[in-house]
Amino acid sequence: MPLNNQITMKQRIILLFSILFFTLICKGQQIALVKYRGGGDWYANPTSLPNLVKFCNTNLNMNLSEPATVEVGSKDIFNYPFVHLTGHGNVIFSDDDIKNLRNYLLAGGFLHIDDNYGLDKFIRPQIKRVFPELDFIELPYNHPIYQTYSFPRGLPKIHEHDNKPPQGFGLIYEGRLICFYTYECDLGDGWEDQAVHGDSEEIRTKALQMGANIIQYVFTK
């Protein structure tokens, strides 16, 4: 009986997400920035997602509306097929946050985590609480997420931090990529207005193209 109840609840969540997803396709998709607790600066790159939305609409003929902000524990997260989490500092998920995020990802949602430098040691333990049975694995360079705009060597290096190569890690649940973690890359900084970091047009274009790859992957896979 408990198992049947679990399955029924999962089916209801999937149905709810499917209805919301279909509605978003008809009216124009919307992505969201994740707001979390713990003192970390979830708001670190205010121009990033708006610029990525503009790039996707212009270059991939998408119909994305202005990005929203959503708390990790809010039921409103189910309104967004793609959510983006970034920052430099501490991240704390409550038990309710953990349950909500897990249900969202199992129901078809997608989480992109972008290490804005210093996030790694905080975010990994929290994600492990969400999916204790899963581990981040580095995606191979021939993964479809690198192929709308071709990145044959994986993630581009946007900002130098600790002289480490950029790495793209994924959480895979029952064969589906549910979370993509961009580490030592700093994609979000590359999406920002040029005046913020002074990056070259070449660097910013690479960052936006890789961001567009992630969005395209989510909406087509």
Image (cartoon, rainbow, N blue to C red):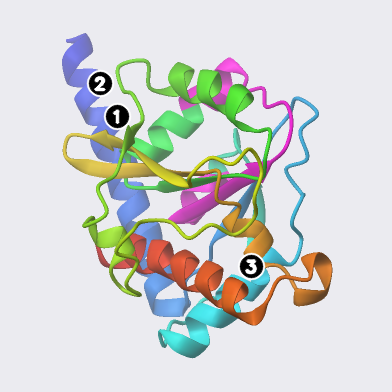
Give the residues in magenta.
Answer: 76-99
Image quadrant assignment for residue 154: bottom left
Vertically, is 65 above or below 151?
A: below
Tell me which corner region of the image, top left, top right, bottom left or bottom right, holds residue 22: bottom left
**Quick check: 72 left or right of 88?**
left
The kind of secondary structure element at disc 1 is helix
Of tags 2 and 3, the one toward the viewer is: 3
Which amino acid, by three-letter code, is at mark 3?
Trp
**x and y percentages locating residue 133 in the rendered image:** 30, 16
Judge left or right: residue 69 versus residue 60.
right
Q: Secondary structure at mark 2?
A: helix
Residue 31: which disc? none
Residue 80, x across and y down, in percent: 49, 56
Name the residue rendered at 58%, 30% in the picture: 120
Q: In the structure shown, which secondary structural element does the residue marked by tag 3 occupy?
A: helix
Q: Which residue is mark 2?
A: 6
- Look at mark 3 in the image and give the residue it sits on: 191
Q: Quadrant of the N terminus?
A: top left
Badge 1 is on which residue? 9
Question: Do residues under tags 1 and 2 come within 8 Å of each other at their CB atoms?
Answer: yes
